[in-house]
Image: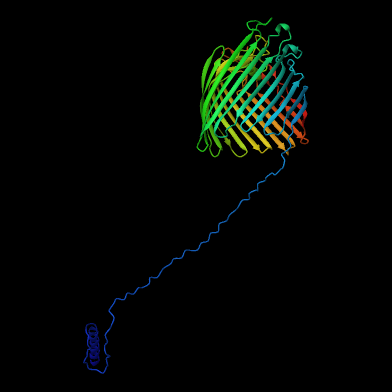
Amino acid sequence: MRRVTHILTLIGAVLIGSFSTVFGQNDIIINASGNRSVEDAHRLNSQPKILDTVFPIPSTSYPLLSINYEPTFEIPKIEPAKVNLQQKLPQLYNGYARIGIGSLLMPLAEIYYNNGRSRKMNYGGHLHHLSSFGKMRNVAPANFDRTNIRGFVGVNEKKYSWDIESYYKNQGLHFYGFPNEDADKDSIAQRFNTFGLKGGFNSHAHDSLGLNWKIGMEYRHFNDKKPKADSLKDWNARENFFAIRTGAEYKWGAEIFAADLDILHNSYKYGVMNDTMPGFLNTGLEGKNTIISLRPSISTYSKNLKLKAKIGVDLTASIGTKSKVYLYPIAEVKYSLFNDILIPYAGVAGGLTQQTFKRITDENEFSLSNVSLLNEHKAADGYIGIKGTLSKRIGFNVFASFSHVKNKALFVTDTTYSGGNRFAVIYDTMNITKLEGSIYYQLKEKVKIDVIGRYYSYNAKNNIFAWNLPQFQVILRGTYNLYDKFILTIDANLEGGRRAKVFGPGEDVLEENNQYALKLGFLADANIGLEYRYNKRVSGFINLNNVAAQRYKRWYNYPTQGFQAMVGVTIRF
C-alpha cells in the first residue's frame, strides 16, 4: 500500500511540475514524504511547435516478362545492270539484194538501198519483181507478173520534217477462170499501170504546248492496158486521183484541240463517152467525184492520265453527179486500269469512203474495167472492247463492232460482157456485226506469235448473202529466232462461210428469194519460211507456200495454185 502511495505521489508531482513549467515564473517547492530526490526545474526558452513526421510510401514495381522475338530477313539478290559502253554502233548496211526461183518458173528479184544511219536525212529506193510462167491444171493460162519501183527522200529537223515519195507499179495477169488450158493468152490478158507522187510537211515547233500543223499532197494515175487494135485504143479505163490532207492541233492544259481538213478528187473515164465499143454492148463511162471533209475534235486526259476521251464531228460533202452533205459523230473513251494491265474502250464513228477503180481492182483484180463508182457511206459504226496485258510477254485485244453501211461493194460473176470469167460490182445496204479477238506472245526477239480470230454477221437489204465475204477468219503468224542463225516464220489464213452468186441450181447451191448461192468451201492457206544466216552479209532462204496443197477458190471459178516452193539468197551491201 505504501508503494502504491509513493507512485501516485510521484505522478502527481510530475503533472504539477509540467503545468508550472508552462504557466509559472518562480520555483516550485513540493513537500512530500520519501527518500527520492527531485532535480530543480528550469525554464524552456523555445516556443512549442508541431513536429510532422512524413512516412515514406514504398514504390511497387511490376517488371514485364522478358519475351525475345528474333525476326528473320531474306534479301533477294538483284542482278546488276549491264551498261553497254560500245564506242561505235552496230554495223548497218546501206542495202540488200535478194534473188530466188520457185516452182512453176517463178523468178524473184528485189533490191533495196538507203543512205544508212542519219539523224536528219533519209533517202533511198526499192525495186521488187515477181512473176510466174508456169501452167495451172484445168484452167486457162494463169501467168502473171508484178513489178514495183519506189524512191523516197525525207528530212527531219528539230522544228519540222518533210518527205517526198514517188512510185510506179506494173501488174500483168490473165482472166484464167474457165477450163481451157490451150486458150489464147493475149485474148484474156490484163495489165494495170500505176504512177504516184506524194509528200508531206509536219511542224514540230512545240513539244508540249502550242500549235502544230501538217499538210500532205498526193497525185496518182491508174489505168488498165490499151487494146492492140487501133479501133479500140481509147477503150480502156484510166483514173486520176488528187488529194490534199491538212491538219492542226493545239494543246491547252489537259485538252488538245484538233481539226483535219481533207480534199479528195477522183476522175474516172472508160472508153469514149456517149459511144459504144465496136462489136460489144458496153458503152463509155465517165465519173468525177470530190469529197471535202472537215473533222474538228477535242481530246482530254484526266484521272492522272488514266482517262482519255475524244469528241468531235465529221462534216463531209460529196460533190459529183449528186451532191450531198453528211454529218458523222466522233466519240471515243479509254480508261487505264491497274497501270495499263486492262484498258476498256468504246466509241462511235462513221465516214464516207471514196470509191475508185484502183480500190476495186486492189480487192479483186479480175473485175471489169467498166464499173460504176459509188462512195461507201458508213452511217454509223459503234464499237466496244477491252485490251491489256496478261504478263510482260502476253497481251490481248477483244472487241465488237456494229455498223450500218450503204453502197457496200460486192463482186458477182458477170454474164453480159465477159462470158463468166470476170466480175461486176454491185452495191447493197447492210448491217455488219464483227466480233474480233487477238492475243500475242513475245519473248524478246526470240519468239513472236500472233493469233487473230474474227466472226462476221451480214444482214443485206437486197442480197441473201454478202457475196465472197467470209463469215469467220483465223490468222496465225509466228517467228522463231534460233541463235540469230536460223529464222523460222509461219503464217496461216483460214476462212469459211463464203458464198458466190450463181445463176442457176446445182450441187451445193442454195436457192432463196430467186437467188442462187454456191458454197466456195473452206479456205486454208499456210506458208512456212526458213532463213539461214551464213554470216552478217549472206543468207539463204526457202519458202514453202500453200503447204496444205489446197486449190481453194478465192473467187468463183478462180482456183489457186497448189503447193509451191521457192529458194534464194540474200546479200547485204
Residue at image x 62%, y 26%?
Answer: 201
**Can the viewer see residue 374?**
no
Q: Tell me which colouring the rendered structure shows.
A: rainbow
Q: Is residue 364 above or below residue 4?
A: above
Q: Is residue 418 above or below residue 113?
A: above
Give the x, y percent position of residue 27: 23, 89
Left/right of residue 132 with respect to residue 397 in the rendered view: right
Q: Is residue 507 above or below residue 158?
A: above
- Image quarter in which the N terminus is found: bottom left
Residue at image x 66%, y 31%?
Answer: 477
Give the x, y percent position of residue 260: 55, 24
Name the foreground residue: 51 vs 452. 51
The picture quadrant where one finds residue 259 is: top right
Please count the marks in the image: 0
**Can the viewer see residue 56?**
yes
Name the foreground residue: 198 vs 19. 198
Give the x, y percent position of residue 563: 74, 25
The picture quadrant where one finds residue 14 is: bottom left
Name the foreground residue: 146 vs 364. 146
Residue sitting farthest toward the bottom: 35
- Image quarter in which the C terminus is found: top right
Give the x, y percent position of residue 507: 65, 16
